[in-house]
Protein backbone atom coordinates (compact mmCIF):
# COMPACT_ATOMS: atom_id res chain seq x y z
CA UNK A 1 0.00 0.00 0.00
CA UNK A 2 2.88 2.36 0.72
CA UNK A 3 4.23 1.98 -2.81
CA UNK A 4 0.80 2.50 -4.36
CA UNK A 5 0.05 5.54 -2.21
CA UNK A 6 3.39 7.24 -2.86
CA UNK A 7 3.21 6.52 -6.59
CA UNK A 8 -0.24 8.10 -6.76
CA UNK A 9 0.95 11.07 -4.69
CA UNK A 10 3.85 11.68 -7.06
CA UNK A 11 1.64 11.22 -10.11
CA UNK A 12 -0.92 13.75 -8.87
CA UNK A 13 1.39 16.35 -7.32
CA UNK A 14 4.49 15.91 -9.53
CA UNK A 15 6.42 16.05 -6.23
CA UNK A 16 9.26 13.52 -6.42
CA UNK A 17 10.43 14.05 -2.84
CA UNK A 18 9.37 10.51 -1.84
CA UNK A 19 11.14 8.76 -4.71
CA UNK A 20 14.00 7.66 -2.46
CA UNK A 21 11.48 6.12 -0.03
CA UNK A 22 9.73 4.38 -2.90
CA UNK A 23 12.98 2.77 -3.98
CA UNK A 24 13.78 1.81 -0.38
CA UNK A 25 10.40 0.09 -0.19
CA UNK A 26 11.14 -1.64 -3.50
CA UNK A 27 14.50 -2.86 -2.19
CA UNK A 28 12.75 -4.23 0.90
CA UNK A 29 10.29 -6.12 -1.30
CA UNK A 30 13.22 -7.67 -3.17
CA UNK A 31 15.04 -8.50 0.07
CA UNK A 32 12.06 -10.21 1.68
CA UNK A 33 11.09 -12.25 -1.38
CA UNK A 34 11.35 -15.98 -0.79
CA UNK A 35 13.48 -18.22 -3.00
CA UNK A 36 10.26 -19.82 -4.26
CA UNK A 37 9.19 -16.48 -5.74
CA UNK A 38 6.46 -15.87 -3.16
CA UNK A 39 6.75 -12.80 -0.96
CA UNK A 40 6.80 -12.91 2.82
CA UNK A 41 3.43 -11.52 3.78
CA UNK A 42 3.80 -10.14 7.31
CA UNK A 43 6.85 -8.80 9.14
CA UNK A 44 7.38 -8.06 12.80
CA UNK A 45 8.36 -4.54 13.83
CA UNK A 46 12.00 -5.70 13.95
CA UNK A 47 11.63 -6.83 10.30
CA UNK A 48 11.81 -10.54 11.06
CA UNK A 49 9.25 -12.67 9.28
CA UNK A 50 6.06 -13.02 11.27
CA UNK A 51 3.99 -14.85 8.67
CA UNK A 52 5.30 -16.16 5.34
CA UNK A 53 1.77 -16.52 4.00
CA UNK A 54 -1.43 -14.81 5.04
CA UNK A 55 -3.67 -14.37 1.97
CA UNK A 56 -3.50 -15.60 -1.61
CA UNK A 57 -3.91 -12.10 -3.04
CA UNK A 58 -0.71 -10.61 -1.62
CA UNK A 59 1.45 -11.52 -4.61
CA UNK A 60 -1.04 -9.80 -6.91
CA UNK A 61 -1.14 -6.71 -4.73
CA UNK A 62 2.63 -6.32 -4.62
CA UNK A 63 2.94 -7.03 -8.34
CA UNK A 64 0.34 -4.35 -9.04
CA UNK A 65 2.25 -1.89 -6.83
CA UNK A 66 5.53 -2.73 -8.54
CA UNK A 67 3.93 -2.23 -11.95
CA UNK A 68 2.83 1.25 -10.85
CA UNK A 69 6.34 1.92 -9.56
CA UNK A 70 7.79 0.87 -12.90
CA UNK A 71 5.32 3.14 -14.69
CA UNK A 72 6.61 6.02 -12.58
CA UNK A 73 10.35 5.28 -12.62
CA UNK A 74 11.02 3.17 -15.74
CA UNK A 75 13.62 1.42 -13.55
CA UNK A 76 14.82 -1.82 -15.18
CA UNK A 77 15.23 -3.59 -11.82
CA UNK A 78 11.60 -2.86 -10.98
CA UNK A 79 10.52 -4.21 -14.37
CA UNK A 80 12.58 -7.35 -13.77
CA UNK A 81 10.81 -7.93 -10.46
CA UNK A 82 7.39 -7.35 -12.04
CA UNK A 83 8.19 -9.96 -14.69
CA UNK A 84 9.43 -12.43 -12.08
CA UNK A 85 6.30 -11.91 -10.00
CA UNK A 86 4.04 -12.42 -12.99
CA UNK A 87 5.96 -15.55 -13.98
CA UNK A 88 5.52 -16.90 -10.45
CA UNK A 89 1.79 -16.24 -10.51
CA UNK A 90 1.36 -17.86 -13.95
CA UNK A 91 3.47 -20.86 -12.94
CA UNK A 92 1.34 -21.30 -9.82
CA UNK A 93 -2.02 -20.82 -11.57
CA UNK A 94 -2.99 -17.66 -9.70
CA UNK A 95 -5.62 -16.95 -12.34
CA UNK A 96 -7.93 -19.35 -10.56
CA UNK A 97 -8.02 -16.92 -7.62
CA UNK A 98 -9.25 -14.06 -9.84
CA UNK A 99 -6.32 -11.98 -8.66
CA UNK A 100 -5.17 -8.75 -10.32
Image (tube, rainbow, N blue to C red):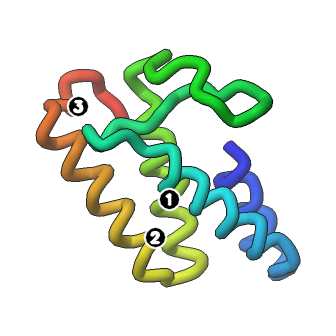
Element type at mark 2: helix
| Quadrant occupied by the C terminus | top left
Taking the spot 66% from the left edge, 57% from the top edge, the residue there is 25
Circle 3 packing at 10 Å, graded few (<14), some (14-19), many (20+), is: some
Q: Quadrant of residue 18?
A: bottom right
Taking the spot 49% from the left edge, 40% from the top edge, the residue there is 61
- Which of 53/57 is in front? 53
The answer to whether the residues at label 2 and label 1 have Cβ atoms under 8 Å apart is: yes
**Discs 3/2, front:** 2
The answer to whether the residues at label 3 and label 2 have Cβ atoms under 8 Å apart is: no
Marks 1 and 3, the one that precedes in the sequence: 1
Residue 44 visible to an observer of this rendering: yes
Query: Taking 50 as reference, is 94 above or below it?
Result: below
Marks 3 and 2, the one that precedes in the sequence: 2
Residue 78, disc = 2
Element type at mark 3: helix
Left or right placement of residue 82 versus residue 91 in this view: right
Left or right placement of residue 52 versus residue 72 in this view: left
Residue under label 1: 66
Residue 4 in picture, x, y percent from top left = 65, 53
- Which of 79/95 is in front? 79
CA–CA distance in space, label 1 to label 3: 17 Å
Residue under label 3: 94
Taking the spot 44% from the left edge, 20% from the top edge, the residue there is 53
Left or right placement of residue 22 versus residue 52 in this view: right
Residue 51 in picture, x, y percent from top left = 54, 18
Element type at mark 1: helix
Amino acid sequence: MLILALCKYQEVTKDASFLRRLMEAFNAVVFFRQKSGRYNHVLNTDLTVKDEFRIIYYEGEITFALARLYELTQDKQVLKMVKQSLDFMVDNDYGKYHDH
